Image (cartoon, coloured by chain):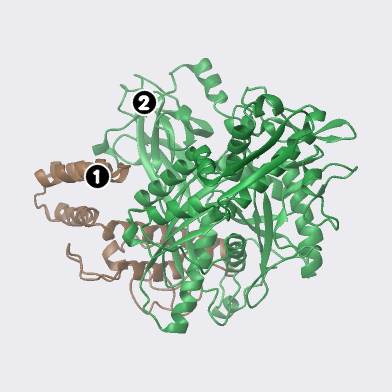
Amino acid sequence: KSQSHCWSCGKTAASWPFLVCEACRSVQPMDPFVDYFQIFDLDRTYEIKDNNLEGKYKDWQKKLHPNLVHSKYEQKEKAFAVEQSAHVIDAYRTLSKPLSRALYLVILEGMHVDEEKTLIDPNVLTEMMEIREAIEEASDSDTLKQIQSQVQSV
Amino acid sequence: MAEQFYTVASDSETSADDRQQPSLPDIAIGIDIGTSQCSIAVWNGKRVELLRNTRNQKLMRSYVTFKNEVPSGGASQNLSHDEQEILSGSAVFNLKRLIGRVDTDPVVHASKTLPFLIQTLDIGDRPFIAALVNNVWRSTTPEEVLAIFLVELKKVLAEVQLKRPIRNVVLTVPVSFNRFQLTRIERACAMAGLHVMRLMPEPTAVALLYAQQQQQSLHENMGSGTEKVALIFNMGAGYCDVAVTATAGGVSQIKALSGSTLGGEDILDNVLRHLVPNFYNLYSSPSVDKIKSMGLLRIATQDAIHRLSSEISVSINVDAGDGTKISRDLDRSEFEEVNRSVFEKCERLVSQCMLDAKVIAEDITDVILVGGCSNIPKIKNLLRVLCKRKEVYQGIDPLEAIVYGAALEGAIACGVNDPSGSLDLLTIQATPLSLGIRADGNAFAIIIHRNIAIPARKEMLFTTAHDNQTEALIMVYEGEGKKVEENRILGFFKIAGIPPAPKGSAEISVCMDIDASNSLRVFAGVFSAGTQQPLSPFIEVRMPTLDGGHEWCEALIKKHGSELDLATMPRKLQP
């Protein structure tokens, strides 16, 4: 379902998700099939047991960050690194907060739900998206508290 | 050393062996250009070393003197100019407060009491700056002054001492610098023959040094590898910056940044106006005979402020020679009262940064104070109170930490490997200012919020403001104001070929992309309704493209009114 050979040295991927080649350390192109939970080797559930998300995130960045790419084909690999690094940043930000983690799960499951023609209320999804946006835009603690009380009253 | 050989990326196959031998470029040097002082450092193969000038100084006064035919920087002179000579009109300094600013900027107006010529016409153009040479005001620009100074640092200092050509630099910059100011710094570097590998916000350079120290103490003590959160407060002569960093495993993640044009110069200005109430009237855009008097007042007051860091009360006795005399005592509480607004602003910057980083005092492992103003007892005290602790971090030299971090980043950016692992470090930067476009009239629609980790890429949908509108203007701004006119314009371009339709139905996508070297690209175009498929090729623009300020927008509005306006899409339709 996804590529399994390193673009740089040609070796077969030793593990999955294949973000970095274990043999030559080259950053691989983005694989759209890798979701945020897979990046952090977590089960796709709301209750994540791992409390070392930050550590794993930083380990990934040390392997993926474009500022650390110094290869012969620097420009090409840097382009991959920019994408991968930004993807891992998004993954970390989404999974580290309970609300955004829940929303992400809904979106992931929603994609499956569509395929299997099960019902999910699109209004709930929209509402949750709006709450997420509002939280991201909140600039002070008062606004955050207000959103919190709104969410709890639902 | 031979000229570095560069190849364009190729798609040909490579082997793992090729990767083991990256062609090592000359290691980038770190430069901290301060408003008042500068320093330069380099990774020497084992550790970071600060370079000294012929007067054995590691910290050098930042100024350029125009006394002779050829202007020269002050860093490498065999004979030091004394401060009075620097203030004689022939030298230009404080250029970090002037670079990339227009003549309507309050900071430029406040600088008019400096002893060289700053003229403003208040039209949004750059100010006219000149130094006194043989009784003639010779014009220059902040970029030129910075370039002259950088050439001096490069040729006379670094290349002589390191015995190799220097091309690559990591330069530190204030957090509050906008993208336009950053391009001015890059231009000055290009004029000086230097290639900027990174422009690092000053406190993030300190964060990198802190990350290295935490890694080393981890190796030595076998301590726990838990994450450490540090608040870094940096205040020099020109700028005040705050950063919150979360460090683990040598990776420093910048959680939040805040900053302002606020520093020792403002404190000096406040005290001068306090001691000489009509100071601004007497000395702004000074005549030649007033310059010497002003210089004497500045030196005496500066000295008093320095002494107040260790003494409770100091006496000031100075005769400016033009009828102005100061002969009195100044005590610490009076000094603190005079600068109350400065200290309050510092508090706000710290609180804002903690709020943005979503940390409270109890989350912070270490509080790090750097910069010349970090010596001021009131500053130390307010940080201790805000962060609820008795002592601040002691393991860092407050005047050398920034350049040290810049040199570390220089080595890392060049791919230098240290067997002991002391360069096994990474900084994940955050955007200090929000980025967005003009929409819904004059509102600022933010696409990338401040303090988002980079690299980052965010997309937002907009729509037309009028029925059958076929063209729209994408006006890109940077800042925190709710209205665009409170922010800095970076550039604009037009999207054409929108299919005629009722207002609010077209889907115009605007995507912003910041790569790891902090360069910004904006992509925009029209989607075929509901499909996320481009109707025609998108437009990609590297920002900033503009030199001027908000005056351009006024010209655009005068010409086109609201006919090219955009509106934001309702949230539920956003991708």
Amino acid, disc 1: Leu
Q: Residue at x 48, y 38 (%)?
A: B341
Residue B246 in percent (x, y) is at 40, 63
Q: Which chain is green?
A: B
Residue B553 in percent (x, y) is at 52, 24
Chain letter of the residue carrying label 1: A
B57 w.r.t. B238: above or below:
below
Query: Which image quarter is the C terminus of chain A in?
Result: top left
Q: Colour of chain A?
A: brown
Q: Residue at x 49, y 17 (%)?
A: B560
Would you say the residues marked 1 and 2 are in contact, meaning their CB atoms lie under 8 Å apart?
no
Secondary structure under tag 2 reads loop
**Residue bearing the label numbered 2:** B440
Q: Residue at x 64, y 47 (%)?
A: B304
Dot 1: within a 10 Å radius of its alpha carbon, few (fewer than 14), some, or many (20 or more) residues? some
| Residue B3 seen in the current view | yes
Chain letter of the residue carrying label 2: B
B476 w.r.t. B471: above or below:
below
Name the residue nearer the viewer: B497 or A89: A89
Left of B248 or right of it: where is A94? left
Residue B348 in percent (x, y) is at 41, 43
For the image, the number of numbered tags is: 2
Residue B33's disc is: none
Name the residue nearer the viewer: B448 or B83: B83
Left of B535 or right of it: where is A98? left
Query: Which image quarter is the N terminus of chain A in?
Result: bottom left
**Residue bearing the label numbered 1:** A144
Amino acid, disc 2: Asp
| Residue B454 seen in the current view | no
Secondary structure under tag 1 reads helix
